[in-house]
Image (tube, rainbow, N blue to C red):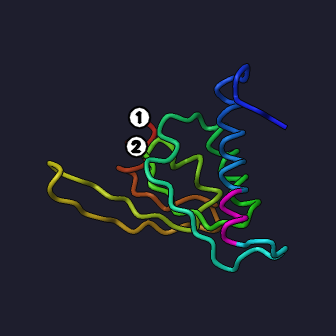
Amino acid sequence: IYRSGAGKSGGQREKLATTCLAAALRYQLGGDEQERPSYAAVVLDEAFGKADNEFTELAMRIFERFGFQMIVATPLKAVMTLEPFIGGACFVDITDRRHSATLAIEYDETRQRLDLPEQVRGEELMA
């Protein structure tokens, strides 16, 4: 039993907080029932922007283990780490904080990657 995050590294505190969040959400959505809810979407905005790839993967595995369907808005740099957990994506480009455009991105089952346009993949690697 943890009484606080004191004395733990930043990564250990992130893991503990993520596990607690997933468990609390699972309990709230499913109650005392043993079965997972059939639909349990979790929306994370600005997700994993400051996290390293290892934590991002760990967090996604935790939420997956609890049976959640994740909807994640994240910086482009985290997309490659998220690819094993997603079935598609939507790239949103905002210009001058006034105009936005979207691009639906398919998931290539054969390559097990998002079918990103080369321009977007190049920007992703630069981030």
Three-letter amino acid code of the residue under disc 1: Met
Q: Is the residue marked by circle 1 packed among few (<14), some (14-19), or many (20+) residues within 10 Å?
A: few
The question of residue 28 being in magenta is answered with yes
Q: Position of residue 106 (x, y in %)?
A: 49, 69
Q: Position of residue 119 (x, y in %)?
A: 35, 49
| Extreme-top residue of the structure | 7
Q: Is the residue marked by circle 2 packed among few (<14), some (14-19), or many (20+) residues within 10 Å?
A: few
Which residue: 41% across, 64% down? 90
Quarter of the picture containing the C terminus is top left
Which residue: 23% across, 53% down? 94
Q: Which residue is mark 1?
A: 126
Vertical order, 33 against 97 (above or below): below
Mark 1 and mark 2 residues within 8 Å of each other at the beta carbon: yes
Vertical order, 68 against 2 (above or below): below
Residue 80 falls left or right of residue 120: right
Three-letter amino acid code of the residue under disc 2: Gly
Q: Which residues are magenta?
A: 24-29
Which residue: 71% across, 48% down? 20
Cα distance in 3D space between marks 1 and 2: 6 Å
Badge number at residue 72: none
Which residue: 50% across, 34% down? 50
Q: Position of residue 121 (x, y in %)?
A: 43, 48
Badge number at residue 122: 2
Q: In this orientation, which residue lies closer to the viewer: 93 or 111?
A: 93
Residue 7 quadrant:
top right
Tell me the element at label 1: helix
The question of residue 20 being in magenta is answered with no
Residue 66 falls left or right of residue 91: right
